[in-house]
Image (cartoon, rainbow, N blue to C red):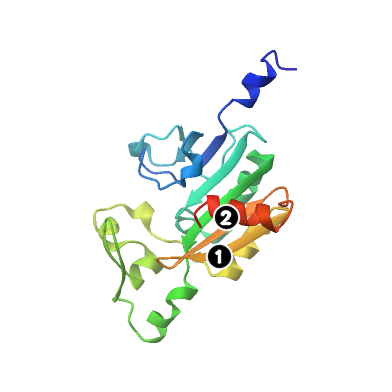
């Protein structure tokens, strides 16, 4: 039993575990997490993560200790068999009322570029420069040219592929929707939202 007064326990900042976070401040996070404690996990020592680790091995984090696991544009850098490993680990470290949020490129959304033989076409402009359909599938070319081979894409996702991977863990509910810039977002909850209003409020707060 904790000796900490109940009001102090309630005031403890919630914990967000950011997988494949990159450098501090580099990740976009919804405003709802502004006051949360963030634990940055990355396998690249150059970005000075809080924990230097492969995202498929979160053994340094206690089971049930995270309120949210956040993974934005990380899964595509893993081979498909590793994606299930990461999701299983994310489920383990989540609290009973926690959830996993995943954002990945939506390959189905750029299918027309493949069909029309337009892989070199610019799909959208990013802060790092123009992003082509080829970049979305295989990894951002300018980063790869500079030798950042860890940024290559080793797997890809459509709604069904992502859903199948999330079902590797016994989440109570999985919600999925498309985002701008040809992104696919999924929220996997360990506890099912009480009703449609709670579900919609969560998606709105996540700015998805």
Which residue appears farthest toward the top when viewing the image? 3
Which residue appears farthest toward the bottom when viewing the image? 116
When asked about the image quadrant of residue 93, the answer is top right
Of label 2 and label 1, which has the lower sequence position? 1
The residue lying toward the viewer, choosing from 44 and 27, is: 27
Where's residue 174, x and y in %?
A: 66, 58
Q: For this view, does 84 lie left or right of residue 145?
A: right
The residue lying toward the viewer, choosing from 161 and 82, is: 161
From what the image shows, is residue 201 above or below residue 141?
above
| Residue highlighted by disc 2 | 203
The quarter of the picture where the N terminus appears is top right
When asked about the image quadrant of residue 77, the answer is bottom left
What SS does tag 1 mark? strand
From what the image shows, is residue 92 above or below residue 105?
above
Where's residue 172, x and y in %?
A: 73, 53
| Residue drawn 63% across the image and 47% down it | 99
Where's residue 75, x and y in %?
A: 50, 55
Where's residue 40, x and y in %?
A: 46, 37
Query: Can you tell which of label 2 and label 1 is closer to the viewer?
Result: 2
Report if the CB atoms under discs 2 and 1 are less than 8 Å apart: yes
Instruction: Tally the numbered discs.
Output: 2
From what the image shows, is residue 51 above or below residue 54?
above
| Residue highlighted by disc 1 | 177
What SS does tag 2 mark? helix
Dot 1: few (<14), some (14–19), or many (≥20) neighbours within 10 Å? few
The residue lying toward the viewer, choosing from 121 and 12, is: 12
When asked about the image quadrant of residue 43, the answer is top left
| Residue drawn 49% across the image and 54% down it | 207
């Amino acid at each position: 039993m904790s000796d900490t007064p109940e009001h102090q326990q309630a005031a403890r900042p919630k914990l967000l575990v950011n997988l494949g976070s990159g450098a501090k401040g580099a990740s976009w996070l919804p405003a709802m997490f502004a006051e949360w404690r963030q634990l940055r996990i990355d396998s690249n020592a150059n970005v000075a993560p809080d924990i230097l680790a492969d995202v498929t091995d979160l053994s340094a984090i206690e089971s049930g200790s995270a309120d949210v696991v956040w993974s934005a544009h990380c899964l595509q850098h893993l081979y498909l068999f590793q994606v299930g490993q990461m999701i299983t680990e994310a489920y383990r470290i989540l609290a009973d009322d926690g959830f996993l949020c995943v954002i990945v490129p939506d390959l189905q959304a750029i299918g027309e570029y493949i069909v029309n033989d337009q892989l070199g076409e610019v799909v959208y402009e990013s802060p790092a420069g123009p992003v082509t359909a080829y970049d979305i599938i295989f990894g951002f070319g300018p980063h790869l040219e500079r030798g950042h081979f860890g940024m290559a894409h080793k797997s890809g996702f459509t709604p069904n592929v992502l859903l199948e991977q999330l079902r590797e863990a016994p989440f109570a509910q999985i919600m999925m929707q498309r985002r701008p810039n040809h992104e696919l977002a999924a929220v996997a909850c360990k506890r099912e939202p009480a009703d449609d209003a709670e579900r919609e409020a969560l998606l709105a707060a996540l700015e998805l």
